[in-house]
Image (cartoon, rainbow, N blue to C red):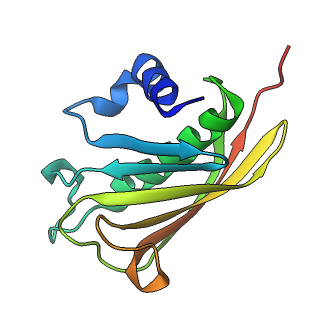
Amino acid sequence: MSLTEVVDFLEREFPQIHHGGRSYHLEAVGPLRARMRMDHHERHLRPGGTVSGPAMMALADLALYAAILANIGPVGLAVTTNLNFNFLRKPGTGSLVGEARLIKLGRRLAVGEVLISSAGLDTDAEDLVCHATGTYSIPPTR
């Protein structure tokens, strides 16, 4: 699927991701990859003023799902079966960017990772705020 096709699919099938205002923006998709940005917003903050873990978890989950859709097509019932997060450092006060990469894309399972950094910084190890891995179950085709 193209970038536009994935965005249209997410808008149609998962409009709830924009509840309270649009925060997540799919910026690119490609072979086994996707990049998604999460705008900095007060609703994503935890006490102390930093971006909350659940906000970063949503970013990683959406970025991996977008990478899967871009590579297998519009499969609404591809579901998350596992997510693992390593929060590495406090993010900056701006937007976050999740760079998703699929490590394995089989008929029934997809496994990938997401490198999350503050917008404008590289995904070099010293700039990462979170490293996530995830596994998704892909339903059989009938």
Q: Is residue 81 left or right of residue 46?
A: right
Q: Quadrant of the N terminus?
A: top right
Residue 22 figure quarter: top left
Residue 65 figure quarter: top right
Q: Residue at x 59, y 50 (%)?
A: 33
Q: Is residue 103 left or right of residue 34?
A: right
Q: Residue at x 55, y 55 (%)?
A: 100
Q: Quadrant of the C terminus?
A: top right
Give the camera-side residue of 43 and 1.
1
Residue extending furthest toward the top: 142
Give the camera-side residue of 18 and 124.
124
Give the camera-side residue of 35 and 60.
35
Q: Is residue 129 left or right of residue 102?
A: left
* Rendered location of residue 119, percent (x, y): 29, 64
Q: Is residue 129 above or below residue 111?
A: below
* Rendered location of residue 103, percent (x, y): 73, 58
Residue extending furthest toward the bottom: 126
Q: How many marks?
A: 0
* Rendered location of residue 7, percent (x, y): 44, 29
Q: Residue at x 53, y 43 (%)?
A: 29
Q: Is residue 95 left or right of residue 102?
A: left
Give the camera-side residue of 114 and 121.
121
Q: Residue at x 28, y 72 (%)?
A: 91
* Rendered location of residue 62, percent (x, y): 48, 43
